[in-house]
Image: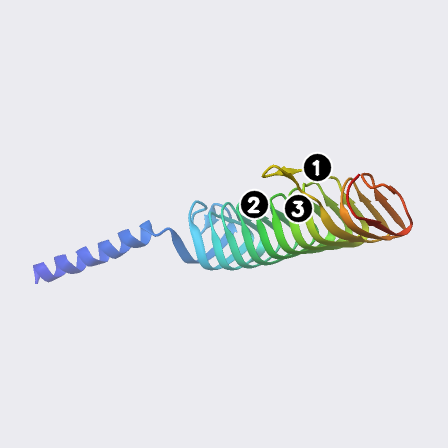
Protein backbone atom coordinates (compact mmCIF):
# COMPACT_ATOMS: atom_id res chain seq x y z
CA UNK A 1 0.00 0.00 0.00
CA UNK A 2 2.80 2.40 0.91
CA UNK A 3 4.52 1.61 -2.38
CA UNK A 4 1.32 2.36 -4.33
CA UNK A 5 0.86 5.68 -2.53
CA UNK A 6 4.48 6.56 -3.26
CA UNK A 7 3.99 5.73 -6.94
CA UNK A 8 0.83 7.88 -7.13
CA UNK A 9 2.60 10.80 -5.46
CA UNK A 10 5.51 10.40 -7.87
CA UNK A 11 3.22 10.38 -10.92
CA UNK A 12 1.28 13.46 -9.76
CA UNK A 13 4.52 15.32 -9.08
CA UNK A 14 5.87 14.39 -12.49
CA UNK A 15 2.73 15.72 -14.21
CA UNK A 16 2.95 18.99 -12.30
CA UNK A 17 6.63 19.39 -13.12
CA UNK A 18 6.05 18.72 -16.84
CA UNK A 19 3.10 21.12 -16.89
CA UNK A 20 5.21 23.83 -15.26
CA UNK A 21 7.95 23.31 -17.85
CA UNK A 22 5.65 23.60 -20.89
CA UNK A 23 6.60 26.41 -23.24
CA UNK A 24 2.98 27.33 -23.91
CA UNK A 25 -0.46 27.04 -22.35
CA UNK A 26 -3.83 26.52 -24.06
CA UNK A 27 -5.77 29.16 -22.15
CA UNK A 28 -5.17 32.61 -20.71
CA UNK A 29 -7.23 35.13 -18.76
CA UNK A 30 -5.51 38.38 -17.85
CA UNK A 31 -6.99 41.12 -15.70
CA UNK A 32 -3.92 43.34 -15.79
CA UNK A 33 -0.39 42.04 -16.13
CA UNK A 34 0.95 40.52 -13.87
CA UNK A 35 -2.52 39.56 -12.60
CA UNK A 36 -2.96 36.82 -15.21
CA UNK A 37 -3.12 33.01 -15.26
CA UNK A 38 -0.12 32.53 -17.57
CA UNK A 39 3.03 34.53 -16.91
CA UNK A 40 4.11 37.09 -19.49
CA UNK A 41 7.29 35.18 -20.41
CA UNK A 42 5.22 32.14 -21.48
CA UNK A 43 3.28 31.54 -24.70
CA UNK A 44 -0.40 30.79 -25.27
CA UNK A 45 -1.59 28.44 -28.02
CA UNK A 46 -5.37 28.51 -27.97
CA UNK A 47 -7.47 31.29 -26.44
CA UNK A 48 -6.50 34.49 -24.62
CA UNK A 49 -8.86 36.99 -23.00
CA UNK A 50 -7.26 40.21 -21.80
CA UNK A 51 -9.95 41.80 -19.67
CA UNK A 52 -7.89 45.01 -19.38
CA UNK A 53 -4.29 44.30 -20.37
CA UNK A 54 -2.47 41.06 -21.04
CA UNK A 55 1.05 40.25 -22.17
CA UNK A 56 2.68 37.01 -23.32
CA UNK A 57 5.61 35.79 -25.39
CA UNK A 58 3.87 34.07 -28.35
CA UNK A 59 0.14 34.02 -29.04
CA UNK A 60 -1.31 31.47 -31.47
CA UNK A 61 -5.08 31.21 -31.80
CA UNK A 62 -7.88 33.62 -30.84
CA UNK A 63 -6.91 36.77 -28.95
CA UNK A 64 -9.43 39.25 -27.55
CA UNK A 65 -9.31 42.08 -25.03
CA UNK A 66 -8.81 45.79 -24.42
CA UNK A 67 -5.01 45.86 -24.67
CA UNK A 68 -3.40 42.80 -26.26
CA UNK A 69 0.40 42.66 -26.21
CA UNK A 70 2.60 39.91 -27.65
CA UNK A 71 6.38 40.05 -27.38
CA UNK A 72 7.01 37.31 -29.95
CA UNK A 73 4.95 35.69 -32.69
CA UNK A 74 1.25 36.52 -33.14
CA UNK A 75 -0.71 34.12 -35.32
CA UNK A 76 -4.46 33.74 -35.75
CA UNK A 77 -7.28 36.22 -35.04
CA UNK A 78 -6.91 39.24 -32.78
CA UNK A 79 -9.52 41.78 -31.70
CA UNK A 80 -9.06 44.62 -29.21
CA UNK A 81 -8.74 48.33 -28.59
CA UNK A 82 -4.94 48.30 -28.73
CA UNK A 83 -3.08 45.41 -30.38
CA UNK A 84 0.70 45.39 -30.33
CA UNK A 85 3.11 42.70 -31.50
CA UNK A 86 6.90 42.93 -31.27
CA UNK A 87 7.48 39.83 -33.39
CA UNK A 88 5.88 38.69 -36.64
CA UNK A 89 2.12 38.81 -37.18
CA UNK A 90 0.23 36.31 -39.35
CA UNK A 91 -3.53 36.42 -39.56
CA UNK A 92 -6.53 38.69 -39.05
CA UNK A 93 -6.49 41.73 -36.79
CA UNK A 94 -9.04 44.39 -35.83
CA UNK A 95 -8.60 47.23 -33.33
CA UNK A 96 -8.50 50.95 -32.78
CA UNK A 97 -4.68 51.01 -32.71
CA UNK A 98 -2.64 48.19 -34.27
CA UNK A 99 1.15 48.05 -34.02
CA UNK A 100 3.34 45.41 -35.69
CA UNK A 101 7.07 45.69 -35.13
CA UNK A 102 7.96 42.54 -37.06
CA UNK A 103 6.81 41.14 -40.40
CA UNK A 104 3.06 41.49 -41.01
CA UNK A 105 1.25 38.95 -43.18
CA UNK A 106 -2.52 39.05 -43.52
CA UNK A 107 -5.27 41.60 -42.86
CA UNK A 108 -5.10 44.52 -40.43
CA UNK A 109 -7.91 46.99 -39.81
CA UNK A 110 -8.00 49.90 -37.37
CA UNK A 111 -8.25 53.65 -36.88
CA UNK A 112 -4.44 53.80 -36.69
CA UNK A 113 -2.17 51.09 -38.10
CA UNK A 114 1.60 51.19 -37.65
CA UNK A 115 3.53 48.49 -39.53
CA UNK A 116 7.23 48.78 -38.70
CA UNK A 117 8.43 45.59 -40.41
CA UNK A 118 7.87 44.31 -43.92
CA UNK A 119 4.30 43.49 -44.87
CA UNK A 120 2.18 41.37 -47.19
CA UNK A 121 -1.59 41.56 -47.49
CA UNK A 122 -4.09 44.32 -46.78
CA UNK A 123 -3.83 47.21 -44.32
CA UNK A 124 -7.10 49.12 -43.95
CA UNK A 125 -7.84 52.05 -41.64
CA UNK A 126 -8.00 55.76 -40.95
CA UNK A 127 -4.26 56.42 -40.78
CA UNK A 128 -1.80 53.83 -42.04
CA UNK A 129 1.95 54.26 -41.54
CA UNK A 130 4.36 51.71 -43.02
CA UNK A 131 8.04 51.88 -42.17
CA UNK A 132 9.27 49.07 -44.43
CA UNK A 133 8.62 47.33 -47.74
CA UNK A 134 5.05 46.28 -48.46
CA UNK A 135 3.30 44.07 -51.01
CA UNK A 136 -0.46 44.28 -51.32
CA UNK A 137 -3.18 46.87 -50.67
CA UNK A 138 -3.07 49.86 -48.33
CA UNK A 139 -6.39 51.70 -47.96
CA UNK A 140 -7.43 54.52 -45.63
CA UNK A 141 -7.91 58.23 -45.14
CA UNK A 142 -4.16 58.91 -44.93
CA UNK A 143 -1.54 56.42 -46.08
CA UNK A 144 2.16 57.04 -45.52
CA UNK A 145 5.07 54.75 -46.34
CA UNK A 146 8.71 55.27 -45.36
CA UNK A 147 10.34 52.40 -47.20
CA UNK A 148 12.36 51.21 -50.16
CA UNK A 149 9.78 49.15 -51.98
CA UNK A 150 6.04 49.00 -52.50
CA UNK A 151 4.31 46.52 -54.80
CA UNK A 152 0.58 46.98 -54.99
CA UNK A 153 -1.81 49.86 -54.48
CA UNK A 154 -2.52 52.74 -52.11
CA UNK A 155 -6.09 54.00 -51.95
CA UNK A 156 -7.05 56.98 -49.78
CA UNK A 157 -7.61 60.71 -49.55
CA UNK A 158 -3.89 61.38 -49.09
CA UNK A 159 -1.21 58.92 -50.18
CA UNK A 160 2.48 59.59 -49.51
CA UNK A 161 5.47 57.40 -50.34
CA UNK A 162 8.57 58.90 -48.78
CA UNK A 163 11.37 56.58 -49.85
CA UNK A 164 14.93 56.68 -51.16
CA UNK A 165 15.28 57.31 -54.90
CA UNK A 166 17.32 54.18 -55.49
CA UNK A 167 17.81 50.81 -53.85
CA UNK A 168 20.59 48.49 -54.91
CA UNK A 169 19.92 44.78 -54.38
CA UNK A 170 22.35 42.10 -55.60
CA UNK A 171 24.19 44.74 -57.59
CA UNK A 172 21.07 45.92 -59.45
CA UNK A 173 18.84 48.96 -59.07
CA UNK A 174 15.38 48.00 -57.84
CA UNK A 175 12.44 49.82 -59.40
CA UNK A 176 9.52 50.83 -57.20
CA UNK A 177 6.22 49.63 -58.63
CA UNK A 178 2.79 50.60 -57.48
CA UNK A 179 -0.46 52.51 -57.87
CA UNK A 180 -1.81 55.45 -55.90
CA UNK A 181 -5.50 56.41 -55.98
CA UNK A 182 -6.71 59.41 -53.97
CA UNK A 183 -7.26 63.15 -53.86
CA UNK A 184 -3.57 63.84 -53.22
CA UNK A 185 -0.83 61.42 -54.26
CA UNK A 186 2.83 62.13 -53.52
CA UNK A 187 5.89 59.94 -54.04
CA UNK A 188 9.63 60.50 -54.11
CA UNK A 189 10.17 57.66 -56.57
CA UNK A 190 7.81 55.14 -58.13
CA UNK A 191 7.19 53.33 -61.40
CA UNK A 192 3.45 53.17 -61.83
CA UNK A 193 0.23 55.17 -61.99
CA UNK A 194 -1.15 57.95 -59.81
CA UNK A 195 -4.85 58.77 -60.09
CA UNK A 196 -6.16 61.80 -58.23
CA UNK A 197 -6.75 65.54 -58.15
CA UNK A 198 -3.08 66.24 -57.33
CA UNK A 199 -0.36 63.80 -58.41
CA UNK A 200 3.31 64.39 -57.63
CA UNK A 201 6.24 62.12 -58.48
CA UNK A 202 9.46 63.92 -57.59
CA UNK A 203 11.72 61.58 -59.57
CA UNK A 204 9.66 61.42 -62.78
CA UNK A 205 10.23 63.48 -65.92
CA UNK A 206 6.81 65.04 -65.39
CA UNK A 207 6.78 65.73 -61.68
CA UNK A 208 3.23 67.05 -61.38
CA UNK A 209 0.04 66.38 -63.29
CA UNK A 210 -3.64 66.45 -62.26
CA UNK A 211 -6.07 63.54 -62.59
CA UNK A 212 -3.59 60.92 -63.83
CA UNK A 213 0.20 60.68 -63.88
CA UNK A 214 1.99 57.71 -65.40
CA UNK A 215 5.68 57.21 -64.57
CA UNK A 216 7.51 54.54 -66.49
CA UNK A 217 10.72 54.89 -64.52
CA UNK A 218 12.43 57.31 -62.13
CA UNK A 219 14.51 59.95 -63.90
- Left-right relation of 130 to 181: left
Number of marks drawn: 3
Question: Which residue appears at 70% of the width and 37% of the height?
Answer: 166
Q: How is the image coloured?
A: rainbow
At numbered mark 3, what does the secondary structure look like: helix, strand or loop? strand
Q: Position of residue 63 (x, y in %)?
A: 53, 58
Question: Which residue appears at 11% of the width and 62% of the height?
Answer: 4
Q: Nearer the viewer, mark 1 or mark 2?
A: 1
Q: Position of residue 153 (x, y in %)?
A: 73, 54
Res. 114 mark: 3
At numbered mark 1, what does the secondary structure look like: helix, strand or loop? loop
Q: Position of residue 154 (x, y in %)?
A: 75, 53
Task: State yes or no: discs 1 and 2 in contact (Cβ < 8 Å).
Answer: no
Question: Which residue appears at 8% of the width and 59% of the height?
Answer: 3
Label whose residue precedes the other's in the sequence (2 or 3): 2
Label whose residue precedes the other's in the sequence (1 or 2): 2
Q: Nearer the viewer, mark 3 or mark 1?
A: 1
At numbered mark 2, what does the secondary structure look like: helix, strand or loop? loop
Q: Position of residue 133 (x, y in %)?
A: 64, 45
* Quadrant into which the N terminus falls: bottom left
- Left-right relation of 94 to 156: left
Res. 206 mark: none
Toward which corner of the image does residue 25 lie, by quadrant?
A: bottom left
Label whose residue precedes the other's in the sequence (3 or 1): 3
Amino acid sequence: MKNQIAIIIFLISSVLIVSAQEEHKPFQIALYNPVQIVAQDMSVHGFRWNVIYGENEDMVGFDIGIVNKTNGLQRGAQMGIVNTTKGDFDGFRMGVVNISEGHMNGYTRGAVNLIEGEGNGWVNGGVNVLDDNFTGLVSGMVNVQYAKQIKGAMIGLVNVINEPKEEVRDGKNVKRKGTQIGLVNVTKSMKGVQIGLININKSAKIKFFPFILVSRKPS
